[in-house]
């Protein structure tokens, strides 16, 4: 129970922009349960927000080490690599997140954004389509429609951007 309270408090402090105190609470939670990968992902996120890249990298790598089957840990590491401009490593972590959780819309959306930002737009389409298939959200439909417009892909089946799509 104390561990959970530490995590909740850390997240609340981060929401209040008190990142130093948030890190202290996460570190206390890690003293209580040092084998929980998700806590290292939180720590990495807070350290990255504080501009402490070395500490963030250590935390994200520890999260992946402790929980190699966690897509969330891979996404945290991918985000770190992206911010740190290590694009090939970011792509590898994103691909691993998609492999681990093929129905994770965030993993597909982040990978699609990666492809769009790195000039590999054709590779983004299937991931944006997957986001829509899994989430069926208006935002996913809009993102896919914007992708098709940006690609000037007028041959695309317009039904594929509908929320009730069965694709």
Image: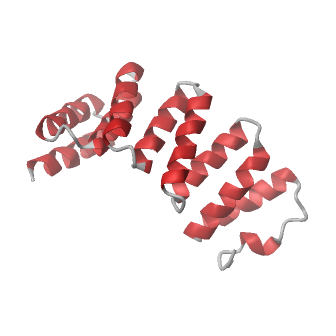
Query: Image quadrant of residue 86?
Result: top right
Who's the residue at 9% across and 48% down the image?
Answer: 2
Q: Position of residue 89 (x, y in %)?
A: 56, 31
Q: Residue furthest left?
A: 2
Who's the residue at 65% across and 75% down the image?
Answer: 163
Of residues 101 and 151, the one drawn nearer to the viewer in this rendering:
101
For the question of whether residue 85 can be seen, the reply is: yes
User: Seen in the image, is 7 located left or right of residue 72?
Assistant: left
Who's the residue at 39% across and 49% down the image?
Answer: 70
Of residues 76 and 62, the one drawn nearer to the viewer in this rendering:
62
Who's the residue at 44% across and 49% down the image?
Answer: 71
For the C terminus, the image quarter is bottom right
User: Seen in the image, is 107 located left or right of residue 49?
Assistant: right
Of residues 147 and 65, the one drawn nearer to the viewer in this rendering:
65
Q: Position of residue 38 (x, y in %)?
A: 30, 45
Query: Is residue 37 placed above or below 155 in the rendered structure?
Result: above
Q: Position of residue 25 (x, y in %)?
A: 18, 36
User: Seen in the image, is 152 located left or right of residue 9?
Assistant: right
Query: Is residue 77 placed above or below 85 in the rendered structure?
Result: below
Q: Position of residue 78 (x, y in %)?
A: 51, 37
């Amino acid at each position: 129970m104390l561990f959970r309270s530490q995590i909740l408090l850390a997240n609340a402090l981060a929401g209040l922009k008190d990142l130093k105190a948030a890190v202290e609470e996460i570190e206390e939670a890690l003293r209580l349960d040092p084998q929980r990968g998700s806590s290292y992902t939180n720590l990495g996120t807070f350290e990255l927000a504080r501009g402490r890249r070395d500490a963030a990298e250590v935390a994200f790598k520890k999260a992946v080490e402790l929980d190699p089957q966690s897509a969330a840990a891979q996404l945290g590491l991918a985000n770190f690599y992206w911010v740190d401009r290590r694009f090939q490593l970011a792509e590898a972590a994103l691909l691993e997140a998609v492999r681990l959780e093929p129905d994770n819309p965030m993993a597909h959306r982040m990978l699609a954004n990666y492809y769009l930002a790195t000039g590999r737009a054709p590779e983004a389409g299937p991931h944006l389509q997957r986001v829509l298939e899994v989430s069926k959200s208006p935002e996913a439909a809009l993102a896919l429609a914007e992708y098709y417009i940006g690609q000037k892909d007028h041959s695309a089946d317009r039904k594929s951007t509908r929320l009730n799509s069965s694709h």
